[in-house]
Image: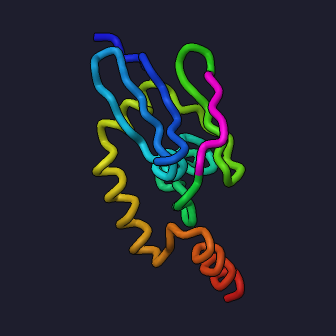
Amino acid sequence: MAMPTPTDIKLHQASKKLEIAFTDGARFELPFEFLRVYSPSAEVRGHGPGQEVLQTGKKGVIINAAEPVGLYGINFFFSDGHDTGIYSWEYLYDLGVNHDAMWAEYLKRMEAAKASRDPGIAAMFDRKVLQK
């Protein structure tokens, strides 16, 4: 069976969510913050297992623009300046299917790191760590 492809993509700025529908009838609403912290970029994912970088301070991030990449994906331009990493249709579908588990895992990692989703608190935390 072929991988489903999008039939509709909408950026909802008020709710800060991407709404995406696929050819198999699946429809997902993915928060911008979730998309940012799970960016497929090397900056976030690293270049191999164990090299992932925990993204802190991304609460409230928005997607300023989106650009199609060929027939297989999309690139997002986030308000924090992040604009690398191609979100393939397959990856977006996977994010939709696994959203709840992935978000819970992210929150667990944030708690373990004593980090914050809030941009101001994250910046203060980063400065304190750098000063030690």
In the figure, 50 relative to 39: above or below?
A: below
Q: Which residue range is magenta in the image?
A: 62-68
Residue at 35% across, 34% down: 28
Residue 73, image x, y percentages: 54, 24
Residue 96, image x, y percentages: 35, 37
Residue at 58% across, 54% down: 61
In the figure, 50 relative to 89: above or below?
A: below
Residue 15, image x, y percentages: 46, 48
Considering depth in this image, is 45 or 28 the residue closer to the camera? 28
Q: Quadrant of the C terminus?
A: bottom right
Residue at 53% across, 18% down: 72
Q: Is residue 55 magenta?
A: no
User: In the visual, does 132 lie left or right of 86?
Assistant: right
Picture quadrant of residue 98: top left
Query: In the orientation shown, which residue stands out farthest toward the front?
Result: 14
Considering depth in this image, is 34 or 114 the residue closer to the camera? 34
In the figure, 47 relative to 104: above or below?
A: above
Picture quadrant of residue 7: top left
In the figure, 94 relative to 44: above or below?
A: above
Picture quadrant of residue 118: bottom right
Give the overall secondary structure of the magenta segment.
strand
Residue at 61% across, 16% down: 70
Residue 29, image x, y percentages: 38, 39
Query: In the orientation shown, which residue stands out farthest toward the bottom?
Result: 132
Q: Quadrant of the N terminus?
A: top left
